[in-house]
Image (cartoon, grey):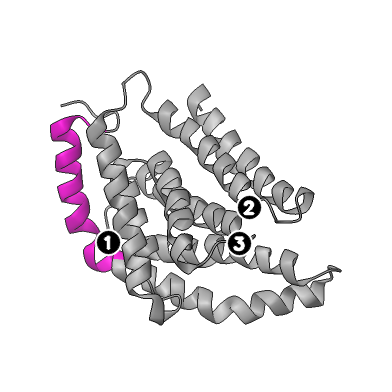
Amino acid sequence: MSKRKIMSVIVLCVLIPAVVVGGFFLAKGKQYYFTSLIIIGLSMLPFFLSLERKKLQVRELVIMASVIAIAVVSRAVFFFLQQAKPMCAILIITSVAFGAEFGFVSGALTMLISNFIYGQGMWTPFQMLAMAMTVFLSAVVIRTFKIKNRFIVGIISGIFCFAVYGIIVDLSSVFMMLSEFNFKSILSIYLSGLPFNIVHGVTTGVIVILVQPEINEKLDRIKIKYGLFGEKI
């Protein structure tokens, strides 16, 4: 692994989870805005490193802002459907095209911004980490193995959405609801969240299967044509 990849793994998979958990216990979950800002700051480091020595273009920031805006709107529009929302699918599809680091930043920012609609709280950093890691890991697997089959891409996306997002978000419920941790209590919380996680994972997988190849083909053309996110014309 290159130094950039090693640093990205350390920041995204070690430092940021430590900030989320540490911020919850040290500040008793009250300083969630400050924790959220640290998450955003740290998640930007691998994104800038992924550009190598290429300067960040204004059009790249516009694309990221547009993706985040679409994802936020998709969560707000389908608020009445509980976990059946296209947000995670949108972020995964764009991250496959623009890079896993792009996905981490957009995933974290999407949850932070959309929670101004749904409500901020001590759960926000966990949701930011959950969405960011789900999108990041999905994009890493799909891009690393150059998977093109829409069904396999959809299955991978659904599994990561179900497992990674569900585990991290339910972990916040464990911390907030339990004063004493034991296997039975923790298991009951995870089982109660299982139906929601299944719906979220299945919805994400189905949407990715339906639209991912066509959208990614257009995004790849734009990326190559304008030399975006490290790609040369």
Task: Answer whether labels 1 and 3 touch (C-beta < 8 Å).
Answer: no
Segment colored magenta:
208-228
Picture layout, residue 217 above or below residue 190: above
Picture layout, residue 78 above or below residue 57: below
Residue hosting label 3: 121
Residue hosting label 2: 32
The residue sitting at 32% across, 66% down in the picture is: 74
- Asked whether, in this view, residue 102 is left or right of residue 130, the answer is left
What amino acid type is highlighted by mark number 2?
A: Tyr
What amino acid type is highlighted by mark number 1?
A: Arg
Task: Answer whether labels 3 and 2 touch (C-beta < 8 Å).
Answer: yes
Quarter of the figure with residue 70 = bottom left
Q: Position of residue 102 (x, y in %)?
A: 38, 41
Is residue 18 one of those drawn in magenta?
Answer: no
Q: Quadrant of the C terminus?
A: top left
Looking at marks 1 and 3 on the same chain, the residue that comes earlier in the sequence is marked by 3
Is residue 223 one of those drawn in magenta?
Answer: yes
Q: CA distance from mark 3 to mark 2?
A: 7 Å
Looking at marks 3 and 2 on the same chain, the residue that comes earlier in the sequence is marked by 2
- Whether residue 147 is visible here, answered yes or no, is no
Please tell me whether mark 3 sits on a helix, a strand or a loop: loop
Front position among marks 1 and 3: 3
Closest to the observer: 84 or 3? Answer: 84
Closest to the observer: 181 or 148? Answer: 181
- Residue 150, numbered circle: 1
Please tell me whether mark 1 sits on a helix, a strand or a loop: helix
